[in-house]
């Protein structure tokens, strides 16, 4: 029979064990982080986050997707975030230059493709066709990685586009095309793949002249740096690499 004096000791020991089970460990370095990621990473990062959570029980990866430049603005203005994955090195450099991000690691590459509505009603077959009179072309704004890549292609090819709109993310461009508001749009090859039957892709040789490299980094203001570092390492590891490859991303 347990002595009444032993009860408090037993309860205290049980409490310590319970707390130890909740404490961060190498296998479970925390509870939750928020990852800011480029819009073009929506599909693969949703899968990667789920896979990470499955391997690290008790953790939650909250995801916020938008254009890389918009995400940088949010971070510099103090938005709570632990990890940033950019669609280009330029926007990441804005954070590392001000010590808002740790040293980034490149984890993927992507190239542009022309997206057209099903059936390709405007008969788009090349990059130059996007500049034809009467063709309603939609692109990303120059400050956005896909827009910067578009500007590079214009310079390389000598083709000047006159878009009907400039969007803040590739998902917005894709939406204009899939809804029939545009005859064509410049997005990433991965966006065309993830869009399924809602659009058609028109590859073009000049796209190899503007390859975007994707870096990821833990942020200096992270409230859970151990988990932030763990997730960034996971993104550069073999499991995440297979997910990215299946989505159409290349290796850096």
Image (cartoon, helix red, strand yellow):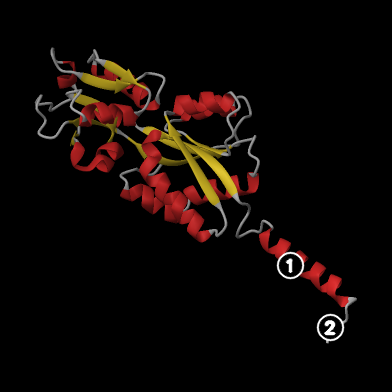
Q: Quadrant of the C terminus?
A: top left
* Residue bearing mark 1: 17
The location of residue 1, given as percent across then percent down, is 83, 87
Element on which disc 1 rests: helix
Q: Quadrant of residue 210?
A: top left
* Label 1 crowd (10 A; few <14 / some 14-19 / many >=20): few
Coordinates of residue 57 in the picture (x, y in percent): 55, 60
Residue 28's place in the image compared with 99, above or below, is below
Furthest-right residue in view? 5
- Tell me if I can see residue 210 in this picture: no
The picture places residue 95, in percent across and down from the top left corner, at 57, 27
Residue 131 horizontal side relative to residue 63, left or right: left
For disc 2, the neighbor class at 10 Å (few under 14, some 14 to 19, many from 20) is: few
Front position among marks 1 and 2: 2
Q: Which residue is mark 2?
A: 2
Q: Residue at x 54, y 37 (%)?
A: 104
**Distance from the alpha carbon under mark 1 to that under mark 2:** 20 Å
Whole-percent x and y of residue 53? 50, 55
| 204 vs 53: above or below | above
Point 49% across, 54% down: residue:
52
Q: Earlier in the sequence, mark 1 or mark 2?
A: 2
């Amino acid at each position: 029979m347990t002595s009444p004096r032993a009860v408090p000791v037993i309860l205290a020991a049980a409490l310590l064990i319970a707390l130890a089970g909740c404490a961060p460990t190498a296998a479970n370095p925390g509870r939750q982080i928020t990852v800011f990621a480029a819009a073009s990473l929506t599909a693969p990062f949703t899968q990667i986050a789920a896979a990470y959570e499955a391997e690290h029980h008790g953790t939650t990866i909250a995801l916020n997707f938008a254009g890389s430049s918009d995400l940088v603005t949010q971070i510099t203005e103090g938005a709570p975030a632990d990890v940033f994955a950019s669609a280009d090195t330029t926007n990441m450099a804005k954070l590392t230059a001000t010590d808002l991000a740790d040293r980034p690691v490149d984890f993927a590459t992507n190239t542009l493709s022309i997206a057209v509505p099903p059936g390709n009603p405007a008969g788009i077959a090349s990059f130059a066709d996007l500049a034809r009179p009467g063709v309603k072309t939609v692109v990303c704004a120059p400050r956005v990685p896909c827009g910067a890549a578009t500007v590079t292609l214009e310079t390389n090819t000598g083709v000047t586009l006159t878009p009907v709109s400039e969007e803040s993310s590739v998902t917005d461009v894709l939406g204009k095309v899939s809804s029939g508001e545009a005859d064509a749009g410049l997005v990433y090859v991965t966006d065309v793949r993830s869009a399924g039957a809602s659009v058609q892709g028109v590859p073009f040789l000049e796209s190899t002249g503007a390859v975007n490299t994707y870096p990821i980094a833990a942020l200096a203001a992270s409230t859970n740096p151990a988990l932030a570092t763990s997730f960034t390492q996971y993104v550069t590891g073999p499991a995440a690499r297979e997910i990215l490859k299946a989505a159409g991303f290349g290796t850096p």
